[in-house]
Structures are given as C-alpha cells and as structure tokens.
Image (cartoon, helix red, strand yellow):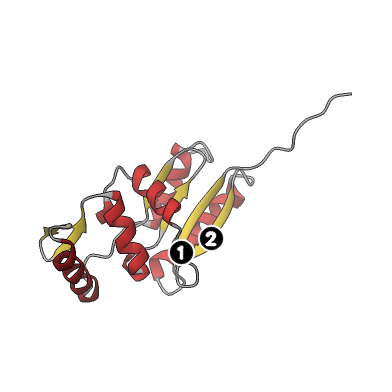
C-alpha cells in the first residue's frame, strides 16, 4: 500500500480594492484564468479596504518587486504627500523626493508608510508567494501573461 500526501495548489494573492475599477477587472480576469487553467492555482483575495496587508507581506512584496516601491504606491494624492512631508520633517531625510511625490528609500520606510497610511498602497497587486513573483496590476489584461510566465496557464 502506498501513501501520498495531499497536493496543495499554489496560492496567488490579489490585493484588491472593490472600489477600484482596475482591481475589479483584475479580479474577474484572475477568476476566469483560474477556470481556464483547470484550477492550477488557488486565489486568495485581500480586500485592502477591510484588511491591512501585514508587515511580512509588504516586505516580501517589496523584495519580489526589486524594492521598486513606486509600482505599488499611489502617486498623486495630496494626503500621501502631506503625510510623508510630516514624516520627513520628523525623521530627517527619510524619503527621496521624486517630482511632487516622496518615495521611501528602504523597505522599512516603505512598510512604515503603508502601515501608517494603508490607503497609500495602490491596488491591485498580484502575488505568487510560492514562486516569488509580484505584479503591480496597472493593465489587468497582462495578468494572463503573468500566469503563463509562472507556468499556470498555456498560451
């Protein structure tokens, strides 16, 4: 008699905002891709309007994106700029100015910014924790390419 451990599907997480049209489109494309791939992966949805992304998740996402924080941060909000300016004034050169915006220089600064201002995170963000990849979803149509690159779908 042989014994086989149950196979767990890889988990692809969508950091989602139900008030964002791009995020809604991304969720629909992801659900369709799951069905088309014959359930090659599971979907985990983090509704960032109801649940904060954890510190560990933020650190991992930053790592997967090569510490390119501007991919996942809102860029034009005056609220973010004023909050970051206050933080900069108290922490002395903690952020780098890029045009009219301030961007964190380190992972810790990124995490502190998002944990202190959860609305500064720009959904949708797609993360494959198993294969170590993340995607700031600005064009939901590219989700299928992301899943093909990860081996979950075929062209």
Point 66% across, 41% down: residue: 8
Point 29% across, 61% down: residue: 73
| Contact, mark 2 vs mark 1 (Cβ under 8 Å) | yes
In percent of width and height, residue 42 lies at 60, 50
Q: Is residue 13 left or right of residue 59?
A: right
In percent of width and height, residue 97 lies at 12, 59
Label 1 Cα neighbours within 10 Å, binned few <14 / some 14-19 / many ≥20: many
Label 2 Cα neighbours within 10 Å, binned few <14 / some 14-19 / many ≥20: some
Q: Which residue has dot 2 on it?
A: 45
Q: Is residue 26 left or right of residue 37?
A: left
In this view, 113 is above or below 65: below
In percent of width and height, residue 11 lies at 56, 47
Q: Which residue has dot 1 on it?
A: 16
Residues at marks 2 and 1, CA–CA distance in whole angstroms: 7 Å
Q: Is residue 9 left or right of residue 18?
A: right
For label 1, the SS is strand
For label 2, the SS is strand
Point 30% across, 42% down: residue: 66
Q: Earlier in the sequence, mark 2 or mark 1?
A: 1
In this view, 29 is above or below 134: below
């Amino acid at each position: 008699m042989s014994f086989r451990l149950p196979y767990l599907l890889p988990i692809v997480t969508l950091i989602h905002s139900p008030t964002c049209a791009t995020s809604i489109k991304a969720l629909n494309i992801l659900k369709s891709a799951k069905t088309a791939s014959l359930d090659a992966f599971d979907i985990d949805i983090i509704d960032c309007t109801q649940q904060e992304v954890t510190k560990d998740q933020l650190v991992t996402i930053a790592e997967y994106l090569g510490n390119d924080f501007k991919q996942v941060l809102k860029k034009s909000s005056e609220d973010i700029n004023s909050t970051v300016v206050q933080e900069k004034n108290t922490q002395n050169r903690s952020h780098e100015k890029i045009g009219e915006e301030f961007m964190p220089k380190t992972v810790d600064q990124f995490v502190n910014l998002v944990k202190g201002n959860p609305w500064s995170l720009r959904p949708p963000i797609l993360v494959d924790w198993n294969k170590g990849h993340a995607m700031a979803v600005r064009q939901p149509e590219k989700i299928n390419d992301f899943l093909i690159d990860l081996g979950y779908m075929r062209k």
